Amino acid sequence: MRTIKYKTAITEAMSEEMARDEKVFVIGEDVDVLGGVFKMTRGLVEKYGARRVRGTPISEAAFIGLATGAAMTGLRPIVEIMYQDFALVGMDQLVNQACSICSMSGGRVRVPIVFRGQVGVGSREAAQHSRQFESWFVNTPGIKVVMPSDARDAKGLLKSAIRDDNPVLFLENRMLFNSSAEVPDGEWLVPIGRAELKRPGRDLTVVATGGAVRKSLAAAASLQGRVDIEVVDPRTLSPLDIDTIMASVRKTGRLLVVQEGPPQASFGAEVVRRCVAEGLSSFRAAPRVLGARDVPMPFSPVLEDACVPQEADIASAAVAMRAE
Amino acid sequence: MSLSVDEKRTLLRTMLLIRRFEEKVKVLYAKKTIDGAIHLYIGQEAVAAGVCAVLRNDDCIFSSHRGHGHAIAKGADLNGIMAELMGRDTGLSRGHGGSMHLFSTAVGLMGGNGIVGGGIPLALGGAFSAQYEGTDRVSVTFFSDGGANQGVFSEALNLAALFRLPVLFVCENNGYAATTPVTASTARIDIAGRAKAYGVPGVTVDGNNALAVRDAAEQAVGGMRRGEGPHLLECVTYRVEPHCGIIADERAPGEKEKWLEKDPIDRLRVSLEEEGAVSSAELEGLEHDVAARIEEAVRFGTESPWPDPDAAHNRRWAVEGDQA
């Protein structure tokens, strides 16, 4: 075991998979210049050359489409989207093309491609650099959605994503870049589609994603002795590991989903739908979703912090639900 | 340019096969044997036949919504095309794609596209794969004057030129984007000129002259195989049929008649007759062969089973054997 940073885990995963498979290449804005704006591809161009680490113009539709066409014809692209908000510029290529082609071809064309890049709130960058749009993709057939919350999962899941024969949206949380975790030495793979219990508890199941996992774990620690919280991180939002979540809900009888995007028609709402359908009688309290305010993310630190669930919000929701 | 008689006959045969296929599709569509949206290629046959005549089996093409002609010219199985149009399990895309999404990787047919201009960036990917693997394969994108007005066209020209990708942009300027004439959609009608603005060689050819199209494509593809990077052909032609299905549209008085005088099939046939390269008995034989092929395709399609909605492969979009 080594303790490494979240961002290091991501760079390592890409580098290991590029060494393992000649068909893997990285493409995106600035990826060949000092490792990109966030340094996630640092060292890759030196190690694997300009042929396999391709910087692009700021033309998201063109390079997302290029990578999709390359995947259709035998390569395994990793597409870095500098901010996930920028993927919206290339949404036709991402959704109408990359997500749809395998199915539209009757399964005769595979599109093994990873769209990865960072998301997050708390860095004061306003609405066009802070969008949480994972729920859109949970509602889009044809793509898997992965959101690691620590370095261990980030490395293992990214390696699995690169080996997957389907499009995978891999969302890295910028607020976790410098967080550290123990990661096993050598080959380390985390399967896509499996949730993980991050903290055991008896009173309340908190299903949290991305940046909300750390806050939920902190809230659980602060309520030690008052409310015994179990924290489940789905890690993969689509396809969803409902069995692990339901096993927890059956034990605690209470479900709180915490996410950093708005709640309506969202991933959190979907978790509630699935859990209610699977086991309504397991609930001792009405399930809740804690999410962002229904506004484009504002800039000011005071406003932004008020817009997304914080540790104290999670703790007070947990206390209230425990009393129901 | 010095084509053998056999090569010219092949061009005529391909064009005739497309024309008679489309005429049959029109009938079947009116009878509801074919459902959905149908975009006919009648009048534009010289473009698909001329371009695909200079391609190898391992070159790939990315077609448009008006793609039956491209599929036939690239050598896709006629039975499979017809069965796909009929939504049958034996169709090229197993009934998942229909008219706009014909895939046959064995002959390099990488699908049509329901989004105007959507296939342009994908074709860059086919070219990227060819270049990445160190081969002299080329990739072709077919689009129209309508597709040229999408932003991805400009982005793709720049990116293709920047990466020196072996991609051939084939703009079939057929005079109409849906029901809007090109004069009402395009400020300056010079698609080849737009290519030149990005440093991409662009030529305008008579798109109703199969020999001229073939000659221009041969020169462009030859250069691409030698590493010259992308080329563009603007083929000036005419969409004889309405945009979609049998919905009527408006044409200026006398416009269609003027173009019908330049029918690409008649022109090549007359020129071959004048050369003494083909006798009327041979032409009759050709018509007979083509009719038999189409009759067989219709029989194959109508006798083929419908897809089973409950079959496992029709219920999931993910590729089997993945990491999930």
Image (cartoon, rainbow, N blue to C red):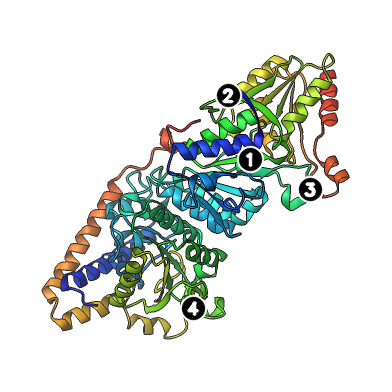
**Which residue position holds label 1?**
A171
What subunit carries mark 1?
A: A
In the rendered structure, which amino acid carries the disc numbered 2? Answer: Pro
Q: Would you say A32 lies left or right of B248 here?
A: right
| Foreground residue among A319 and A235 | A235
Q: Disc 2 and disc 4: Cα gap in Å?
A: 57 Å
Looking at the image, tell me whether mark 1 or mark 2 is earlier in sequence order: 1
Q: Is residue A139 above or below residue A319?
A: below
Q: Is residue A191 above or below residue A164?
A: above
Looking at the image, tell me whether mark 3 or mark 1 is earlier in sequence order: 1
Residue B285's image quarter? Answer: bottom left
| Mark linked to residue A297 | 3
Helix, strand or loop under label 2: loop
Q: Is residue A203 above or below residue A190?
A: above
Q: Disc 3 and disc 4: Cα gap in Å?
A: 43 Å
**Which residue position holds label 2?**
A184
- Residue B139 x/y as whole percent: 38, 60
Task: Name the residue located 36 percent from the left edge and 60 percent from the top edge.
Answer: B138
**Which residue position holds label 4?**
B193
Marks 2 and 1: in contact by CB < 8 Å?
no
Task: Check if mark 3 and mark 1 are on a common chain.
Answer: yes
Q: Disc 1 and disc 2: Cα gap in Å?
A: 22 Å
- Residue A96 x/y as whole percent: 53, 52
What subunit carries mark 3?
A: A
Task: Check if mark 1 and mark 2 are on a common chain.
Answer: yes
